[in-house]
Image (spheres, rainbow, N blue to C red):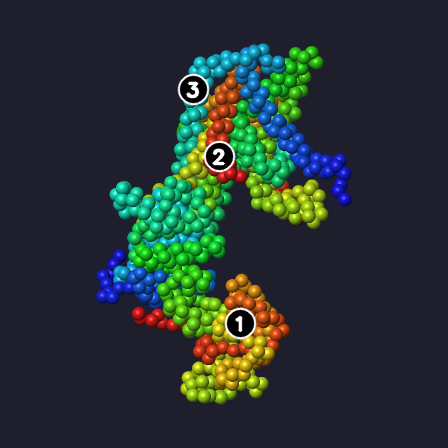
């Protein structure tokens, strides 16, 4: 005997994850609402923040791209990204390679200590760094901030490269060596090409962390204002329609970095 | 690293008293072995017997704690893998996943600074030899298991190694493909004349492919010999048991007749063994008979030949159909359970569970067993 | 360079060849030295720019302020001053309260979110995961500003409502309120909650849930009794992230909260950014760090008991 059609439909409906779908939609609307609003109003021709739009224009972009203050900040943010990626890439790769070869108890010590920056609030680290710079007589500048950015990004880079090395098949190196390769040649032709996506991904993530950082730059960059610092200054002064455009530019910068990072590392493979 | 001790007579490989320990585990225990040029030599044993460690010492990935490894007469005990004239086909191939098939195979030649056009020619030739011609531009991680296996073989063989080392290269393939590759490997080896050292735990594979087989257990080399001698004249219980199925009996001798020892139980059951002159009545002998050498005849059809051979009466307990073969478990009064095997044909179906049968085998089908002890490698 | 991992056997001992044995030991030692050389730059950087600054902050908390200049000393008066200031006690308690509420809210959203991602919409989980990642990197300051433009007196909600004639005066309590601070922080913290829980859930096979369902458990029960304990590591990490982030928060209350909605982080910022009484600020920071440790311990042991 078959069940009546209406019951089948009911069961089928109940099996559909409608509740889950509704939940996820709500979460994503909440997560993206501020960003969507900001991007939308960056194209509004009127400085007023109300619907409906007065019209679509790129005047706020024209304004910020002729504003030397913003342009200089933009350049500093890009510099911070590059420097952070560079420092963390080199240090992280070396450390991840080195840690494979030390005894297990040392490995634990290193891995645990490396998580330190994640375990304390950014504010406390930022003031610690500011105190340190003052004590050793280093002035506030974009470079001072860069060093701090690299420090907070280093654990991520180290862990991401470490994870990719963990999945690396070391038998490949034996194969290379068996075919006549020296260790260095095997590293260059086998290890490096295979972990390079993870290394680049980790560096992009470091760059994104650097561009996004506000707190460390606030306490250590001084007059070398990055984009987040410029935004903060203008927000304090009140509503400024160019902020939507600056925010959108930053959003594009950080999310595209994060996107490229994710598509290259295990973060993205999940 | 040569110590200059070249010998007048040079086997492809010579191991002298090689021992390797991992902590308290002796992985390879005082192994001495010579492998001839052009030989297909298999190391056969259960997992953990030390065969792979032995292979890795030949390749240079492990250094012996004791003893020496000679390659074509040259002491290579301490030579790094990249400086040895051996190449290896790894168990899981270890193809470089970020390279094409061509670049995988060309890797060794590039390191030897072989001219570019010669590399191209040799790689393509080698790919043809192993049967993957035309796959050169394919990415290495887009190959089937069998193709990967062939590429790994090409990548190793192209360097014209003094010895090719193969570490269970077929174990990841399905049965059908494995059978085909066994024959192909054998014929490639034959046509190139390269010395192969082949590690496997599959006795059938070892017997089928090799010129000689070395059986290992607990790090010791128990017996070396041609497949036939390994199978038919195993020197000890482990070898006999590991290679093929075995009926293993202990009998008490009731009388002797020249160099024949006879055991009888008075019910007409009789076992005759070639035992040598030293055997006395009352001695206990351990003998073994391969199942396919044991014949069953329904008791009803038995013609009493009156010959003084082996004869036991028994009852068929179970019939196990195995495709090409059928196995019979027979309960005999004198020796307990005996396993017999024959080709599955019309006659095979006539023997059914419960049937009373006569169990017989030729006197020379039985061989005596000793406890396991290692044998010295025969100096060829 | 790295392959020694797979090759690390016991110390090589060669009875017959003394000299070559020494060669092998030397190779071994060279590799170990290489490992430490590779670890050195990162470790040195980490020590110099992380451990030393934190030690410096600790030292600073004992310094004396002379003419607005911190002078090396060992006084406990900074701590005494910081701990007896009533506003610190009030802000500290409020911060802990806010952090607790936010943690609960974020966990209540993040766990189902990670669950749905990993088990319900398994086919699309990469895309969804990526969207969450994007929102994590959507910009800290950018998002705070965006909330201002949504909730402000001249923000999207008020302007639109006025424009449509629904209200005449802008609703004031949307911005510069605890509501705005909370909304923005929850928004910022959800990805930080989802990521570790989702990562931990990767190790839970969907078949485990099917097995629980097969044995008669409802979906909710399976999620609570099977998935939650198995992904507890992630939940703990998420809790820690959210709590830590809230304790150190000061920008959000500054830009979105009213004068009554400040958190303890604002006081630290005040000492370092405005009053320049660094020793007091350092003492407050150290107190916060100790409190954080105590809370982390309490919460984690509570959670352990809960899942036992």
Rendering quarter of residue A8: top right
Q: Would you say B379 lies left or right of A104 here?
A: left
- Observer able to see residue C252: yes
Q: Position of residue A61 (x, y in %)?
A: 49, 15
Rendering quarter of residue B10: bottom left
Q: Would you say B78 lies left or right of C255 here?
A: left
- Observer able to see residue C53: no
Determine which residue is flagged by label 2: A263
In 3D space, how far apart are the residues under numbered discs 2 and 1 (Cα atoms)? 62 Å
Q: Residues within 10 Å of mark 2 (few under 14, many from 20)?
A: some
Query: Looking at this view, is B226 or B84 the one in front?
Result: B226
Q: Which chain carries label 2?
A: A
Up-down: is C239 above or below B280? above
Determine which residue is flagged by label 1: B340
Q: Who comes first in sequence, dot 3 or dot 2?
A: 3
Q: Where is residue B203 in the image (x, y as percent from the top left)?
A: 45, 64
Q: Would you say B43 lies left or right of C182 here?
A: left
Q: Which chain carries label 1?
A: B
Residue at position x 54%, y 24% in the image: C141
Residue at position x 41%, y 51% in the image: B149
């Amino acid at each position: 005997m078959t069940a009546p059609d209406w019951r089948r439909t009911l069961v089928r409906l109940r099996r559909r994850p409608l509740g889950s779908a509704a939940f996820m939609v709500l979460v994503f609307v909440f997560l993206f609402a501020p960003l969507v609003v900001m991007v939308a109003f960056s194209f509004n021709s009127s400085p007023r923040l109300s619907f409906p739009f007065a019209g679509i224009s790129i005047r706020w972009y024209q304004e910020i791209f002729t504003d030397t203050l913003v342009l200089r900040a933009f350049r500093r943010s890009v510099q911070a990204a590059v420097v952070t990626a560079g420092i963390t890439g080199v240090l992280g790769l070396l450390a991840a390679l080195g840690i494979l070869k030390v005894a297990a108890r040392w490995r634990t010590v290193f891995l645990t200590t490396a998580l330190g920056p994640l375990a304390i609030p950014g504010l406390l680290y930022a003031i610690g760094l500011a105190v340190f710079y003052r004590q050793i007589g280093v002035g506030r500048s974009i470079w001072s901030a860069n060093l701090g950015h690299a420090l907070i990004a280093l654990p991520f880079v180290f862990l991401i490269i470490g994870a990719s090395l963990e999945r690396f098949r070391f038998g490949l190196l034996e194969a290379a060596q068996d075919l006549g390769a020296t260790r260095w040649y095997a590293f260059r032709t086998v290890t490096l090409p295979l972990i390079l996506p993870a290394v680049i991904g980790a560096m992009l993530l470091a760059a994104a962390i650097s561009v996004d950082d506000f707190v460390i730059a606030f306490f250590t960059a001084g007059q070398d204002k990055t984009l987040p610092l410029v935004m903060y200054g203008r927000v304090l002064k009140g509503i400024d329609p160019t902020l939507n455009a600056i925010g959108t530019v930053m959003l594009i910068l950080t999310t595209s970095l994060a996107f490229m990072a994710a598509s290259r590392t295990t973060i993205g493979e999940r | 690293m040569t110590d200059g001790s070249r010998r007048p007579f040079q086997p492809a490989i010579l191991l002298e008293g090689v021992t390797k320990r991992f902590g308290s585990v002796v992985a390879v225990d005082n192994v001495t072995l010579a492998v001839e040029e052009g030989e297909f030599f298999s190391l056969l044993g259960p997992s953990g017997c030390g065969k792979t460690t032995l292979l890795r010492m030949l390749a240079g990935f492990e250094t012996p704690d004791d003893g020496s490894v000679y390659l074509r007469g040259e002491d290579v005990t301490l030579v790094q893998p990249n400086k040895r004239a051996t190449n290896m086909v790894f168990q899981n191939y270890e193809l470089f996943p970020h390279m094409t098939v061509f670049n995988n195979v060309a890797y060794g030649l590039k390191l030897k600074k072989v001219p570019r056009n010669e590399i191209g020619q040799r790689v393509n030739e080698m790919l043809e030899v192993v049967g993957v011609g035309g796959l050169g531009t394919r990415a290495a991680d887009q190959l089937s298991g069998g193709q990967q296996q062939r590429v790994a073989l090409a990548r190793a063989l192209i360097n014209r190694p003094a010895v090719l080392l193969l570490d269970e290269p077929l174990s990841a393939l399905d049965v059908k493909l494995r059978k085909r590759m066994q024959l192909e490997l054998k014929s490639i080896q034959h046509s190139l004349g390269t010395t192969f050292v082949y590690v496997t735990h599959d006795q059938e594979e070892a017997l089928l492919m090799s010129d000689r087989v070395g059986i290992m257990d607990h790090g010791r080399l128990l017996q070396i010999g041609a497949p036939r001698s390994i199978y038919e004249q195993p020197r000890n219980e482990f070898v006999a048991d590991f290679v093929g199925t075995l009926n293993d009996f202990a009998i008490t001798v009731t009388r002797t007749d020249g160099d024949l020892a006879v055991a009888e139980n008075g019910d007409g059951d009789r076992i005759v063994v070639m035992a040598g002159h030293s055997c006395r009545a009352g001695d206990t002998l351990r003998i073994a008979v391969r199942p396919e050498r044991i014949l069953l005849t329904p008791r009803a059809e038995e013609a009493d030949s009156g010959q003084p051979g082996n004869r036991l009466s028994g009852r068929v307990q179970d019939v196990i159909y195995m495709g090409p073969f059928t196995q019979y478990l027979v309960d005999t009064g004198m020796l307990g359970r005996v396993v017999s095997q024959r080709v599955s044909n019309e006659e095979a179906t006539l023997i059914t569970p419960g049937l009373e049968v006569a169990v017989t085998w030729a006197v020379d089908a039985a061989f005596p067993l000793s406890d396991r002890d290692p044998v010295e490698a025969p100096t060829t | 360079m790295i392959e020694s991992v797979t090759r690390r056997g016991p110390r090589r001992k060669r009875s017959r060849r003394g000299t070559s044995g020494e060669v092998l030991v030397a190779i071994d030692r060279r590799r170990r030295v290489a490992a430490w050389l590779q670890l050195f730059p990162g470790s040195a950087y980490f020590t110099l720019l992380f451990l030393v600054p934190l030690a410096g902050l600790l030292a600073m908390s004992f310094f004396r302020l002379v003419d607005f200049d911190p002078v090396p000393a060992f006084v406990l008066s900074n701590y005494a001053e910081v701990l007896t200031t009533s506003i610190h006690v009030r802000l500290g308690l409020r911060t802990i309260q806010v952090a607790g509420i936010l943690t609960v809210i974020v966990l209540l959203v993040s766990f189902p979110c990670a669950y749905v991602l990993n088990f319900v919409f398994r086919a699309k989980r990469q895309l969804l995961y990526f969207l969450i990642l994007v929102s994590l990197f959507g910009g800290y300051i950018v998002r705070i500003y965006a909330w201002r433009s949504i909730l402000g007196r001249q923000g999207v909600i008020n302007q639109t409502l006025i424009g449509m004639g629904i209200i005449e005066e802008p609703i004031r309590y949307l911005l510069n309120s605890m509501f705005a601070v909370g909304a923005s922080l929850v928004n910022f913290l959800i990805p930080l909650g989802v990521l570790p829980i989702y990562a931990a859930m990767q190790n839970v096979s969907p078949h485990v849930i099917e097995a629980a369902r097969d044995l008669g458990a409802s979906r909710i029960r399976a999620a609570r009794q099977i998935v939650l304990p198995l992904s507890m590591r992630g939940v703990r990490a998420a809790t820690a992230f959210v709590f830590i982030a809230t304790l150190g928060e000061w920008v959000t209350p500054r830009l979105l909260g009213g004068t009554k909605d400040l958190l303890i982080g604002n006081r630290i910022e005040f000492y370092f950014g405005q009053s320049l009484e660094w020793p007091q600020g350092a003492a407050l920071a150290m107190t916060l760090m100790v409190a954080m440790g105590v809370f982390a311990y309490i919460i984690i042991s509570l959670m352990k008991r809960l899942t036992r």
